[in-house]
Image (cartoon, rainbow, N blue to C red):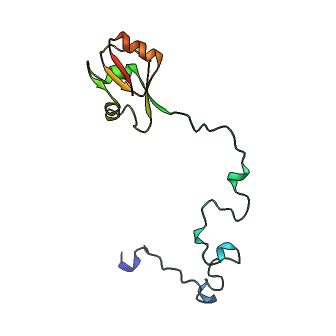
């Protein structure tokens, strides 16, 4: 294989608006008229539909978004039993370190499973079942 036989990696750039013989004369590859043929059209947003009513206004709005809803990362009692040792402090930081909570939401402890270890649990919220299981295990809980 010779050097001149190698495939072209870099294409030659288009020299637009340099006469009809170049193939990109007159309209310079922009078509005839319209908003995108004019100068300064590059700042249009991707979702712009050229004056037609946009899709987000044509589609019906459904449902209800509650701005006051509180989102929780939920952690079950059985997970605490699995990941923590006897007399450990279960705090928000320890739950985030072990990957059990994201740290972006409040944390709620739920009562699924069995707690057999005595733990000191601190979280934003507890379910009634979680509270009863924590108390059965002689563990302590604290709402932050």
Q: Residue 135's image quarter?
A: top left
Q: Residue 123, can we see it?
A: yes
Residue 51 or residue 142, whichever sits in front: 142
Residue 10 or residue 124, whichever sits in front: 124
Percent position (x, y) of residue 65?
A: 62, 38
Q: Residue 114, can we see it?
A: no
Percent position (x, y) of residue 37?
A: 65, 76
Q: Is residue 63 left or right of residue 139?
A: right
Residue 39 or residue 121, whichever sits in front: 121
Q: Is residue 39 left or right of residue 103?
A: right
Please name the residue shown 39% across and 80% down the image: 4
Q: Residue furthest top?
A: 136
Percent position (x, y) of residue 99?
A: 35, 34
Residue 32 or residue 46, whichever sits in front: 46
Percent position (x, y) of residue 134?
A: 37, 15
Q: Is residue 144 left or right of residue 44?
A: left
Picture quarter with the N terminus: bottom left
């Amino acid at each position: 294989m010779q050097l001149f036989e190698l495939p072209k990696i870099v294409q030659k750039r288009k020299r637009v608006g340099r006469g009809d013989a170049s193939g990109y004369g007159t309209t310079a590859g922009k078509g005839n008229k319209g908003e995108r043929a004019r100068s300064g059209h590059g700042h249009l947003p991707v979702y712009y539909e050229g004056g037609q009513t946009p899709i987000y206004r044509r589609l019906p709005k459904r449902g209800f978004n509650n701005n006051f809803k509180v989102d929780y990362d939920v952690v079950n009692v059985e997970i605490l039993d699995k990941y923590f040792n006897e007399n450990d402090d279960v705090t928000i930081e320890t739950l985030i370190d072990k990957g059990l909570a994201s740290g972006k939401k409040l944390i709620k402890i739920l009562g699924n499973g069995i707690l057999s270890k005595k733990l000191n649990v601190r979280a934003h919220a507890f379910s009634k079942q979680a509270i009863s299981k924590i108390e059965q295990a002689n563990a302590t809980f604290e709402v932050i």
